[in-house]
Image (spheres, rainbow, N blue to C red):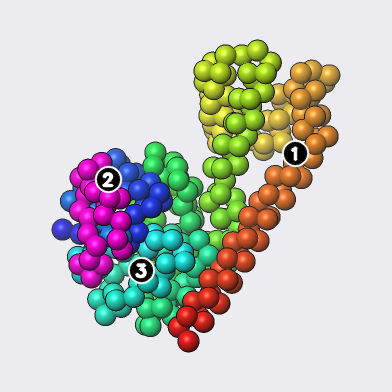
Amino acid sequence: MTKIGFIGAGSMAEAMIAGLINGGVYKPNQVIVANRTNTTRLEELATKYDIITTHDKKKLVSEASIIVLAMKPKDVKSGIDGIQEFITNQLIVSVLAGISIQTITNILGKEASIIRAMPNTSATIAKSATAIAASEHVSMAQIKKCQSLFEAIGICKLVEEHQLDAVTGVSGSGPAYVYLLVEAMEKAAVEVGLDAHVARELIIQTLLGSAEMIESTKKLPSQLRKEVTSPNGTTEAGISILQEHGFEDAVIACIKRATERSIELKTMFSEVLSTTEN
């Protein structure tokens, strides 16, 4: 029986586990999760998903054909330490922001089949937007396996590793941008007289409908916006305020800054881990 193992039991690991089990990709007894010391967290996941949990990383690596590195980036060295000798032909999938394939290879001390992935927390409901980048030691069969893994919890695109910083800024952090927009829309809706519950349902459906329009019509967002915006109408009045406050520039700056931060973290982690090894 093939198993998938998660080293790390945080929110991203749980999001993936929920998506994979709910989507029928893996049965609960094919999922094994390990962390260092947090027994309470492992018990919580075991109770919720009926999966296998352990503090024994060696057991996990020995039993799993796919190993997902899902610990906190700062814990990547301690998370990998002790399992190097058990890494043979397993596929290693890292969802650690800012940790390069080369850094993981250096910690392992040997070449391995490594794929970096940048999913987002919408994996929980099988709506993740994921991009992956593969090391030169990954076979096409392994790439396809990894793609099918993430396609079970959303969409998956293959990119070059250097592009993952941009992916982080756009879709990795993207859900938070949308949630912030919804927060603002909800506050405004209440201030102009709508019931909070009614406002939320209307806003959610507006977001869902707008996304579906972009996908199904294949029209550019700018064209769809113009079709909604009548001269001197309510939409134009609202958009003029957004433009006055630099809405588009703010969104662009937001994504650029998140991308820059991803690059900064990658450099920082690389330097810290290099210093630790020396």
51 part of magenta stretch: yes
Q: Compared to 264, does 30 lie above or below?
A: above
Q: Which quadrant: the N terminus? A: bottom left
* Disc 2: which residue: 44
Query: Would residue 164 be visible to someone looking at this image?
Result: yes
Q: Is residue 153 visible?
A: no
**Magenta residue span:** 36-59
Where residue 94 sits in the image (x, y, percent)? 41, 63
The mark found on residue 247 in the picture is 1
Q: How far apart are marks 3 and 1 (CA)?
A: 41 Å
Circle count:
3
Q: Position of residue 67 (x, y in %)?
A: 31, 64
Determine whether the residue tagged by mark 1 lies in a helix, strand or loop: helix
Q: Which residue is drawn at 37% across and 82% down?
A: 110
71 or 206, which lies in front?
71
Mark sitting earlier along the chain (2/1): 2
Q: In this view, does 75 lie to the left or right of 193?
A: left
- Looking at the image, is 171 positioned above or below residue 114? above
**Residue tagged by mark 3?**
79
The location of residue 235, given as percent across then percent down, is: 75, 22
* 237 versus 216 height, above or below: above
Q: Which residue is drawn at 40% across and 49% down?
A: 11
Q: In this view, does 104 lie above or below 10?
A: below
Question: What's under tag 3, amino acid-wise?
Answer: Gly
Q: What residue type is labelled 1?
A: Phe
Which amino acid type is shown beneath numbered disc 2? Glu
Label 2 crowding class (10 Å Cα cut-off): few <14, some 14-19, many 20+? few
Residue drawn at (81%, 29%) of the image:
240
The residue depicted at 60 percent of the width and 25 percent of the height is 186
Q: Where is residue 255 in the image (x, y as percent from the top left)?
A: 66, 51
Is the residue under label 1 in contact with that under label 2 (CB below 8 Å)? no
Q: What element carries label 2?
A: helix
